[in-house]
Amino acid sequence: MASSSYHQPVMVAGVLRFLACKPGGVYVDGTVGGGGHAAAILEATAPDGRLIGIDLDDEALAETEERLKNFGTRKILHKGNFADMEVILSDLGIGKVDGILLDLGVSSHQLDTTERGFSFTADAPLDMRMDRTLGTTAADLVNRLSEQELRKLIREYGEDVMAGRIAKAVVARRGKAPILTTRELAGIVSSAVPTSMRYGRINPATRTFQALRIAVNDELTNLHRATQSSTELLTKGGRVVIISFHSLEDRMVKTFFRSWEKGCLCPPDFPRCACGGEARLRVLTRKPMVPDAAEVTANPRARSAKLRAAERM
């Protein structure tokens, strides 16, 4: 049975406003999750708007199928990666769309399902795969990467200044026995950082877990591919809306939007454009939209969300 508690979508009103939802439009929700945003889009585009929902997670797709069943053929759900939107839409006979939504990050259901291994609030296998048919888990990375590789991963994807100490502690501990659970890894990270960092507002293991999740699911590569293809998929006046939950993603989205708005990629000192680049997007959010206080109170996991939007020229 579908449940609204499966995943609480963030900034729904902002998503609908920036997507400029309209009857008869065709929209892609590239991270359909539990179908919260998708349901709102379908309601806003009645009676004949269509939505293509994409997700890697079989559980999410099953939940969404149940939640959106009353919309009938107005919705199409597809298991896949949003990085492959062009191929997915082509296979469905769809060329251009009026809007694309990417709500990045981990769903509430994934965080709260212990055996998925995304959270260290309960002990679970170190998994972190969005698509559980994929081969590499977080445990594989923790136990196989060299100390140098682990340090680089945690520093770059977790933006953690303690990456060196954490990597060294992980390698030392796994020399005694493989590291297989979330609580075990969280404890290793905590013991590796200075005492002053162990009891702050953010658990010291948060950044390491973020780094491993990004690596396991190749999230930044997929985001890069999806943003590049979105400019080709949108109709003139079509909108792309991206919600990110950490600074790496937000910087990528900001840079992508600005580069496509500028068009020309020539160095500033060139007297005239030599690259032939054309502006393809108009940025709609000079500063990202963030949840208001009421939403953060109702859904604390929304506090780090940032929404950016652009329009196809």
Image: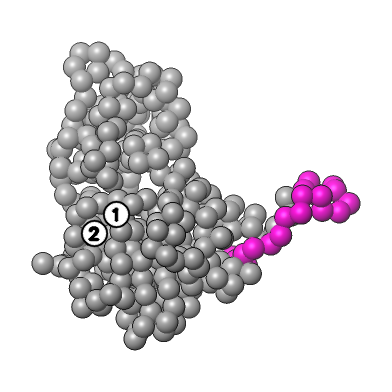
Give coordinates of residue 102: x percent, y percent.
Answer: 41, 60
The amino acid type, in three-letter code, at marker 2 is Leu
User: In the rendered structure, are the residues bearing label 2 and label 1 in contact, judged by CB atoms less than 8 Å apart?
Assistant: yes
Is residue 221 located in the magenta-colored stretch of the structure?
no
Residue at 18% of width from left, 32% of height from top?
181
Q: Residue at x 17, y 68 (%)?
A: 66
Name the kind of residue labelled 1 in the image.
Lys
Q: Which mark is nearer the camera, 2 or 1?
A: 1
Q: Residue furthest top?
A: 175
Which residue sits at x=59%, y=58%?
257
Please identify the quarter of the rendering in which residue 276 is found: bottom right
Quadrant of the image for the C terminus? bottom right
Query: Where's residue 170, x and y in %?
Result: 30, 22
> Would residue 244 be seen by someone viewing this image from the given angle?
no
Q: Nearer the viewer, residue 131 or 158?
A: 131
Percent of width and height locating residue 134: 28, 38
Q: For mark 1, does the 10 Å Cα neighbourhood hold few (<14), some (14 to 19), or many (20 or more) residues?
A: some
Give the numbered dot on residue 61. 2
Corner quadrant of residue 76: bottom left
Q: Determine which residue is flagged by label 1.
A: 79
Describe the element under mark 2 as helix, strand or loop. helix
Other-residue count near label 2 (Cα within 10 Å), few / some / many at <14 / 14–19 / ≥20? many
**Vertical arrangement, residue 56 with respect to residue 176, above or below:** below
Residues drawn in magenta: 266-286
* Front residue (pair 258, 174): 258
**Residue that lies at the very extreme toward the bottom in this rendered image:** 47
Q: Would you say the magenta stretch is mainly helix, strand or loop?
A: loop
Q: Residue furthest left?
A: 1
Query: Separation of disc 2 and disc 1 at Cα?
Result: 7 Å
- Residue, x 27% and y 66% (percent of image)? 35
